[in-house]
Amino acid sequence: MRIQTIILISALSLCFFSCNKKAEYINGSDSCELKLFDDSTYKFSYPTFLGTESEKGFYDIDNNKITLSRKSYHKMDSVDIGYTYSWNGTDKPDSLFLRFKNLNNEVIKAKVKFNSSIQEFESNDLGEIDIAYERLEALRIIDSIEVIEDYTIYFDNNIYSPDLSYYIDSRRPQRIDFKLNQFVGEDYAVLKRVYRFENDTIYINDISRKSIGKHNKLVKIK
């Protein structure tokens, strides 16, 4: 009985320590740190404007990329908007460029209607729609002096009606980037970071350069 107990304790100890074995990666300024554990979990620490943030989740390594996935229970807006006017100062650019992504910065195919029109426009495989304002005028969606006031977006069986009242003025936008929350109405969102992974080096591309400067590589600590 004593021998069986010792064997059991040894087996449990081996399992415990093997599950906690880790690989650790840091960038050149030690401002980012990624720890990978044998049970496919990770801990990632990185700088933000307000200080250092950390997150935990699961990772998956496939060929030359690593995917970090985590559940977020924070309330998130259904739509995040990036709004760009023409750089040449004109209030009437020739076209309107739209781009659609989801919370994980993956391009998506979405459909959109403007104002009260039934005309529907669909994004291409790059998540983009490029529409000439002349066409919108010809379809009588807007007249020659109007801006689009209402956008209705359809994606993944969800309908999004972003509030653009903050942006609406006398100028027509040249570009709008929409980031849609595909988990709207659900208890949590699954957020992902996908990085290139080559020769014990992870190339991060979503941390502000103002925070890490040129140190955008995570190198494995030997």
Image (cartoon, rainbow, N blue to C red):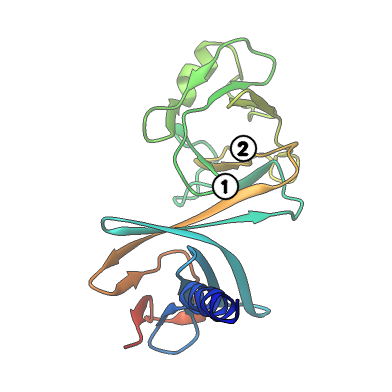
Q: Residue at x 49, y 80 (%)?
A: 32
Q: Position of residue 105 (x, y in %)?
A: 49, 49
When the figure is inspected, residue 75 is found, relative to residue 30, above or below; the finding is: above
Q: Which residue is mark 1?
A: 103
Which residue in the protein does label 2 denote?
182
Q: Which residue does the image show at 61% across and 69% down from the upper left? A: 55
Q: CA distance from mark 2 to mark 1?
A: 7 Å
Q: Tell me, yes or no, whether the two marked residues, 2 and 1, touch with CB atoms within 8 Å.
A: yes
Give neighbour class at mark 1: few <14, some 14-19, many 20+ (Cα, 10 Å). Answer: many
Residue 219 shown left or right of residue 97 in the figure: left
Q: Secondary structure at mark 1?
A: loop
Q: Position of residue 221 (x, y in %)?
A: 35, 86
Nearest the eye: 63 or 12: 12
Q: Is residue 50 above or below residue 159?
A: below
Tell which circle, 2 or 1, labels the residue nearer the N-terminal end: 1
Q: Residue at x 69, y 15 (%)?
A: 116
Residue at the image position 66 percent from the left and 39 percent from the top: 183
| Residue 143 placement (x, y as % from top left) | 61, 19
Q: Is residue 57 above or below residue 26?
A: above
- In the foreground, 51 or 66: 66
Front residue (pair 178, 200): 200
Q: Position of residue 218 (x, y in %)?
A: 37, 77
In the picture, residue 60 is in which quadrant? bottom left
Q: Quadrant of the C terminus?
A: bottom left
Q: Amino acid at mark 1?
A: Leu
Asked if residue 125 lies left or right of residue 64, the reply is right
